[in-house]
Image: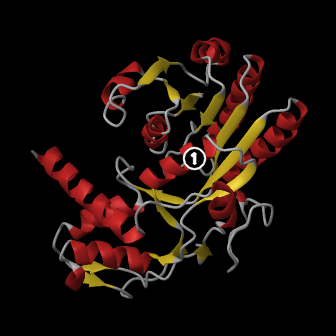
Amino acid sequence: MRVLVTGATGFIGRWILPALVARDCEVVALTCRSSEAYCHGTKLTSGRVRWIVGDLLDHSTIASTVADANADTLVHTAWDTTPGTYWTSSKNLDWISASLKLFQAFQESGGRRIVVAGTSAEYEWGGNEDLVEGKSEQPNTLYGTAKDSLRRMVEQWASIHNLSWAWGRVFCPFGENERPERLIPKLIARLRTDEPMPFDSGSLIRDFISVQDLGDAFAALATSNVQGPINLASGQDTSIRDIVTVLAQHMGQIQNVQFGTLPDPHGQPQRIVADITRQTTELGWHPSATLKQRLIENCDWWMNEQINVKD
């Protein structure tokens, strides 16, 4: 099996590469900058990936890029996820268009299976029930609507062309090389100051998964026969308080955390957790480590990273 991975140097994509290599796939990794391939390309894959450079937002080069890859399976993770802007950015529309061009070029070149990174934002948030594929798919952001719209088009189009397809819905990934302004890197940076840390109640509940495990889940999905939307998640209720506590205890800073001294966030859904029945029964996949283990590993990575930056 030869697999083309888009967004291959991205937060999720870079972890899909070694997981595919471990499954004896031929991997072709697409990046828009050759410098990124040089910096990130061999760290996790020991040179067992062929890198190609191409810009999916340049529609004139998509067909030649796909032809160069000559893959039978496509794993598409490239999208704009700039913190603070991607929920409402018009780039979501650009990525719908680019993705459709990519899928069409892939099918015309003889590709047979498409796997796409979706999002939990395709669901309607706000209830207390686990989010189940095929139910409550009513996004309320431009980002979620863009992903959901693309998924609906792929579903109809793939049926017409007899293509195999799957749509892995991502919940709350964390891990190495995460943007530092996101929750867990910010918490680690604050805890490192060894100062009192006022905090809200931490009662919001989310479904966290290590990006390392998520990359493996996408590789499992790509090499399976599972079709349609499928949640890729831990399926665990984890409160923000739980996350803060694990990190603070590991760093020896739990005495500095002051839960309940700040107001709770306004307008945030109380609970976002996946139903992982399809993941466990049809895909037969589960994380290889506990959430606590992954949080501690990630904390140690960030501590070393920050030390190296200072040095």
Left or right of 233, for residue 307: left
Let me know if residue 267 appears in the view: no
Q: Residues within 10 Å of mark 1 (few under 14, many from 20)?
A: some
Q: Quadrant of residue 4?
A: top right
> Which corner quadrant holds the C terminus?
top left
Give the answer, above or below, for where 127 lies relative to 97.
below
The structure residue drawn at horizontal position 44% and vertical position 44%, both measured from the top left corner, is 11
Left or right of 184, for residue 277: right
Q: Quadrant of residue 125?
A: bottom right
The structure residue drawn at horizontal position 18% and vertical position 76%, both measured from the top left corner, is 252
Q: Amino acid at mark 1?
A: Ala
Give the answer, above or below, for where 10 lies relative to 264.
above
Give the answer, above or below, for where 64 lies relative to 246.
above
Residue 272 spot, x, y in % from top left: 61, 71
Q: Nearer the viewer, residue 233 or 112?
A: 112
Residue 121 spot, x, y in % from top left: 66, 58
Q: Nearer the viewer, residue 282 or 291?
A: 282
Residue assigned mark 1: 220
In the displayed image of the protein, which residue is found farthest to the right? 160
